Amino acid sequence: MLILGIETSCDETSAALVENGKAVHANIIASSKLDFERSGGVIPEYAARRQLECILPVMTECLKAAKCTEKEIDAIAVTYGPGLLGSLLVGTTTARTLAWLWNKPLIGVHHHQGHLDSIWLDQTEEISFPILTLSVSGGHTELWLRESHTTQTQIGSTRDDAAGEAFDKGALQLGLPYPGGPELAKLAMSGDEHAYDFPVPLAHEDGLEFSFSGLKTSLKYLLRDLGVDAEKHFADIAASYQHAICMHLVRQTKRALEKHPEIKEVHIVGGVSANTRLRDMLKAQCDNVTIRWPQTLAYCTDNGAMIAAAAFFTQNKAVWSTQASAKM
Ligand code: KG4
Ligand code: ZN
């Protein structure tokens, strides 16, 4: 089953062709991130206009890269939400038009479901449920207990900022360009992560929630206290700040594992799963379970392939596609 997946929920425009939820034939991504270096964040109206320009060339390039014609496509999948309204409209309108024009079924996919199923892309190993998934991106931070592709419970989420947002807002304070997560991670590589003692959030609470807004404030006060000298210590500050974010994510994941000893497999997905320090810390501290992250960096951040994968794994649920179409 070959599915065309379309993703336009934030500042990416992506189209992908994926066979049976795993084999990626093409995954084309156009990003307007660089346009937002000066603003320090996405300007929704501008992102949607860029997506309108990009969507058809991206689609054409995808079919060309996969050496495929529309006749071979079995269904079209598209992110219906959550995301920026104008951006989502570009993707859903394109998908609905193509589905009508080519007479294909249309499957609406929740963006978070796409991240959850991104692990299966180009995966050759057998993955077995139950799974604990830590989904960390610029818009959400969630812990999911998954019994199957369609039976899953969210057991933790953030009270305020998302983990990626904590990276991005921290990076902005250190004068790094948007999107700050990868930039801060790069700077942290040359720093000492024990140089500054950022408080790990919710350390004395028992639940599985996350909170990052306090960290951002701690960073603000540290920079204020260091004054003109701060810049000399930016690498150490970045490393210590990153360490606190990762520590919080790892601690809550470990707590979830303690509460659910039946889990033998932990996945990290979403943009922040690209962070190598987070991967290393999880591996080191959760050593009695299998830890996986998406096969490539392009599958960590937003992409059309994960939308096609999620559509494949949930398509048999008539209720899912009907609800999704109704929402569009
Ligand atoms: O999944 P994604 O592409 O979009 C959303 O659904 O939000 O995630 C983007 C987020 C941004 O906040 C970005 O800074 C963060 O993922 N990110 C990283 C890294 N690569 C991307 N954060 C930390 N380290 C990285 N290497
Ligand atoms: Zn995302």
Image: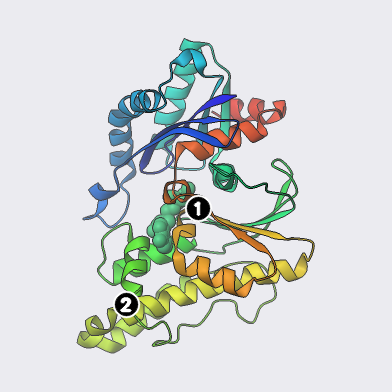
Identify the residue at the far right of this view. Answer: 262
Residue under label 2, please give it. Answer: 190
Query: In which quadrant of the rendered image does the N terminus lie?
Result: top right
SS of the residue at dot 2?
A: loop
Name which of mark 1 and mark 2 comes first in the sequence.
2
Which image quadrant shows ligand 1?
bottom left
Residue under label 1, please give it. Answer: 270
Q: Is residue 223 above or below residue 161?
A: below
Q: Is residue 175 above or below residue 65?
A: below
Q: Amino acid at mark 2?
A: Ser
Mark 1 → mark 2, Cα distance in angstroms? 25 Å
Q: Which is nearer the eye, 232 or 3? A: 3
Identify the residue at the far front of this view. Answer: 124
Q: Which residue: 44% across, 35% down?
A: 88
Image position, residue 84 (x, y; %) = 42, 42
Query: Which one is in front in this view, the residue at disc 1 or the one at disc 2?
Result: 2
Q: Which mark is residue 181?
A: none
User: Is 220 positioned to the left or the right of 103 in the image?
Assistant: left
* Colouring scheme applied when the structure was drawn: rainbow
Q: Is residue 12 above or below residue 191?
A: above
Image position, residue 114 (x, y; %) = 55, 42
Image position, residue 314 (x, y; %) = 66, 34
Q: Amino acid at mark 1?
A: Gly
SS of the residue at dot 1?
A: loop
Q: Which is nearer the eye, 144 or 268? A: 268
Q: Quadrant of the rendered structure where residue 174 is?
A: bottom left
Mark 2 surroundings within 10 Å by alpha-carbon count, few (fewer than 14), some (14 through 19), many (20 or more): few
